[in-house]
Image (cartoon, grey):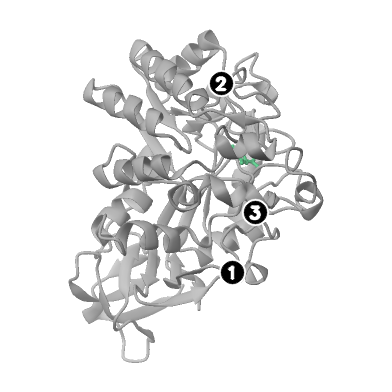
Amino acid sequence: MTQLLITGAATADGNRTDLFVRDGVFAPPSEAGADVERIDADGLLALPGLVDLHTHLREPGREDAETVATGTAAAARGGFTAVHAMANTDPVTDTAEAAEYVLGLGEREGHCQVVPVGAVTKGLAGEELAELGLMATSRARVRMFSDDGRCVSDSLLMRRALTYARTYGGVIAQHSQDPRLAGPGACCHESEISGRLGLPGWPSQAESVIVARDVQLAELAGARLHVCHVSTAESVDVIRWAKRRGIAVTAEVTPHHLLLDTPLVEGFDTTFKVNPPLRTSEHLEAVREALADGTIDAVATDHAPHARQDKDHPFDIALPGMLGLEQALAVVAEVMVNTGRMDWPTLVERMSATPARIGRLAGQGRPVAVGEPANLVLVDPAARAVVDGAASASRSRNNPYHGRELPDPVVATIWAGTVTYRR
Ligand code: DOR
């Protein structure tokens, strides 16, 4: 196994330190031999490997858009050492066998830990609960369940799912989208812009009414709820209320909902079609503030690769979703750290420690310290570059940051003691 001495890095809180990686853990640097491989990390930050709660790896079923190998290579480039693989694959991850299959793909081909997410309902159809217990007790040890891409809109089913998940220490991660208020054709934030463009819009309340219902169901069931991709000020208000009340709710925001706003759809570029849709600046401000104050617990990418033939369509029928893994840290650094809204230790909480806790991942999100698993991202806080979407490790090209100047922070990623990416 790799032995590696990293010299001169600083931890998130600014303490300079040497790090010695041996047998997958951090060992005392004094034990490193003279001939050990070295990385000079002077001027770099050594942060715990990032953990993504929300990744679409598309395998099995849509290997033309992404595979476990290509998606996790993108994750490694983005500084991630673990990703949660969403269940909306083909077949859907709604059985223990399917979850173990995804786990096995990750073990064989992953450039980071792949954590299977189980579907809440069979086939994501929203009618009958999937095998939550069997998935939880399988070798895949599923702890997060989600029909992401679709909302569990039936209140009774949602209540039952929360109750079951609780039995296994699990969490229901909800895609909050009222299917009547935001019907299948809705593809844009309902606003003056959607009206002018003639695009069916969905109001921010189609998200927050489901969040409001679900936090109350979580309270009723005494269970954990996780709100996926929060995009509206109203959802933030509801989550703030629920947390004050002591309800076990956590929430995530995507990098794109922190940075990108509704006017980007005016060119009908389907790269900017995503669900929930890009919102207006008031909503962006609300989610930024909520991430800073902890109302929103985590950043999650919703990395959603799509093949060209699924994006090259009129805006209203193209598939929704955009890439996120490779530029996630860059966007959070730009929007939150470089503006003074957040410091690096808080960023580590939101992108590593807290998501690991929400996903119940024992060996992830740990401090960079002797005896801990060697999951690490080396970050250059000053580097900047223009994003080249064509250079992505992902198999897809729906990169919403292409051509934009952003921080270029990730210098190297180390997962369980192995270098998975090095610039
Ligand atoms: O835009 C999205 N794309 N939102 C989702 O919730 C699902 C995702 C996908 O799977 O493509």
- At mark 3, the secondary structure is helix
Q: Quadrant of residue 285?
A: top left
x and y percent of residue 240 in the render? 28, 29
Q: Which residue is mark 1?
A: 403
Mark 3: give few (<14), some (14-19) or many (20+) Cα within 10 Å: many
Closer to the observer: label 1 or label 2? 1
Mark 2: give few (<14), some (14-19) or many (20+) Cα within 10 Å: many
x and y percent of residue 45 in the render? 30, 72
Identify the mark at residue 164; answer none if there is no mark.
none
In the current view of this chain or complex, which residue is farthest to the bottom? 35
- At mark 1, the secondary structure is loop
Identify the mark at residue 178; answer none if there is no mark.
2
21 to 304, vertically: above or below: below
Ligand 1 within 8 Å, label 3 CB: no
Mark 1: give few (<14), some (14-19) or many (20+) Cα within 10 Å: few
Ligand 1 within 8 Å, label 2 CB: no
Left or right placement of residue 41 versus residue 259 in this view: left
Identify the mark at residue 68; answer none if there is no mark.
3
Of callouts 2 and 3, which one flags the residue occurring earlier in the amino acid sequence? 3
Left or right placement of residue 309 versus residue 286 in this view: right
Decide which of 96, 289 is in the foreground and name it: 289
361 to 371, vertically: above or below: above
Q: Amino acid at mark 2?
A: Asp
Closer to the observer: label 2 or label 3? 2
The Cα atoms of the two marked residues, 2 and 3, are separated by 31 Å
Is residue 87 among the parts visible in the rendering?
A: no
| Residue occupying image coordinates x 43% and y 24% | 168
Of callouts 3 and 1, which one flags the residue occurring earlier in the amino acid sequence? 3
